[in-house]
């Protein structure tokens, strides 16, 4: 069954130097963009993982190399992520997203690479010779907000109906045989696309064991599986039922971000300097700016009649 789409759905997969989102980098990124009507396009980038602070290539973790077959020397002449970022953003623009286990790893790492490029470009704004190029890069980055994209995680659908892995999913849904070149980004991305179409074919009628059917609708598909209301991709900030940001770890776990800002504003400085993803730092910084603005507006507004009466009562009518 072909996908029923109102706008493009972009399948993607990442191979990386390792599994630490805060410190590892992308070495291969593959997109399969499916348009309403069924047309699809494929693009894959080999990328030199780059440390923008130390101006050097991020080395491959040996365990990651064993899985994806990528070695440091394979990447020396490849472009850095920031060099392919304008093209990546064009592929991302106006699209919903899909992948396999992408909510937990691929999407957070893609966001982290974008935030690294943002931070590097912001630093270069202060230099006359790089200001124009840096501003153009920031304008490019601001074209897409990954937090607002619908995300169909095919693994969530798969585990919801048949809890296994991508190789087993392909065997189960796509003819009973393995696909070639598993653990290369392009092969995994294409296989994920084929699995989702086969899932739509398979779960159209209820059975004695499964009454639920699978709707050919991106909004429905994106909501299948366990999901937390994360404000940042790493899940350090979550939203409660009232829509308030709650800290989900450490000594302030369970407290609202606003409460912590009011009682211990230095905590936000600790976050900024700590070993957290840049996306997490950005969301804390956004909340800090919001709270600062609200406090400033509160200080500058005229006192209400109730507040003035409270002052009068406190001083028994005498202010001096």
Image (cartoon, helix red, strand yellow):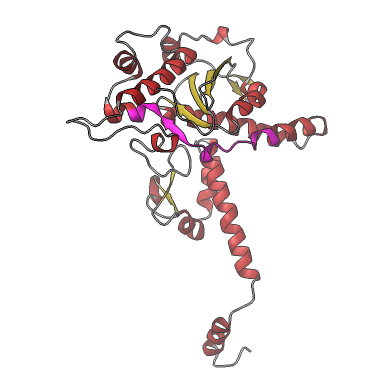
129 on left or right of 207: right
Residue 279 seen in render: yes
- Where residue 234 sits in the image (x, y, percent)? 45, 37
- Where residue 229 sits in the image (x, y, percent)? 41, 45
Residue lying at 76% horizontally and 30% vertically, measured from the top left: 133
Residue lying at 59% horizontally and 62% vertically, measured from the top left: 294
- Where residue 137 sits in the image (x, y, percent)? 70, 31
Q: Residue at the right extreme?
A: 128
Can you say whether 60 is above or below 89 in the image? above
Residue 55 seen in render: no
Can you say whether 40 is above or below 265 in the image? above
Q: The C terminus is located in which quarter?
A: bottom right
Residue 151 magenta-drawn? yes
Q: Quadrant of residue 49?
A: top right
Q: The N terminus is located in which quarter?
A: top left
Residue lying at 34% horizontally and 15% vertically, measured from the top left: 170
- Where residue 55 sits in the image (x, y, percent)? 65, 22
Can you say whether 121 is above or below 263 in the image? above
Residue 258 magenta-drawn? no
Count all numbered tags in the image, as a single digit. 0
Span highlighted in magenta in the image: 139-157
300 on left or right of 16: right
224 on left or right of 34: left
Q: Quadrant of residue 92?
A: top right
Can you say whether 9 is above or below 245 in the image? above
Residue lying at 54% horizontally and 93% vertically, measured from the top left: 316
Q: Residue at the left extreme?
A: 208
């Amino acid at each position: 069954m072909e996908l029923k789409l109102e706008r493009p759905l972009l399948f993607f997969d990442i191979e990386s130097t390792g599994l630490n989102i805060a410190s590892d980098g992308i070495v291969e990124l593959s997109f399969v963009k499916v348009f309403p009507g069924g047309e699809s396009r494929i693009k894959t980038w080999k990328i030199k993982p780059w440390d923008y602070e130390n101006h050097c290539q991020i080395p491959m973790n040996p365990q990651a190399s064993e899985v994806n077959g990528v070695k440091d020397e394979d990447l020396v002449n490849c472009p850095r992520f920031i060099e392919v970022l304008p093209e990546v953003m064009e592929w991302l623009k106006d699209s919903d997203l899909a992948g396999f286990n992408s909510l937990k790893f691929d999407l957070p790492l893609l966001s982290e690479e974008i935030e690294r490029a943002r931070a590097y470009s912001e630093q270069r704004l202060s230099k006359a010779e790089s200001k124009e190029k840096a501003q153009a890069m920031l304008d490019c980055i601001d074209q897409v907000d990954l937090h607002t994209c619908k995300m169909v995680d095919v693994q969530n659908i798969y585990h919801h109906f048949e809890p296994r892995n991508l190789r087993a999913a392909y065997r189960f849904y796509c003819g009973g045989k393995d696909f070639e070149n598993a653990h290369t980004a392009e092969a995994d991305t294409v296989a994920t696309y084929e699995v989702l179409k086969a899932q739509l074919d398979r779960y159209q009628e209820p059975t004695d064991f499964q009454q639920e059917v699978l709707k050919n609708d991106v909004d429905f598909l994106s909501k299948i599986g366990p999901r937390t209301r994360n404000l940042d991709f790493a899940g350090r900030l979550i939203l409660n039922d009232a829509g308030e940001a709650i800290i989900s770890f450490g000594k302030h776990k369970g407290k609202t971000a606003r409460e912590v800002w009011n009682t211990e504003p230095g905590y936000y400085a600790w976050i900024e300097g700590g070993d957290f993803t840049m996306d997490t730092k950005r969301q804390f910084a956004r909340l800090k700016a919001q709270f600062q603005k609200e406090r400033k507006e509160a200080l500058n507004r005229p006192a209400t009649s109730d507040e003035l009466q409270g002052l009068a009562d406190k001083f028994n009518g005498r202010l001096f």
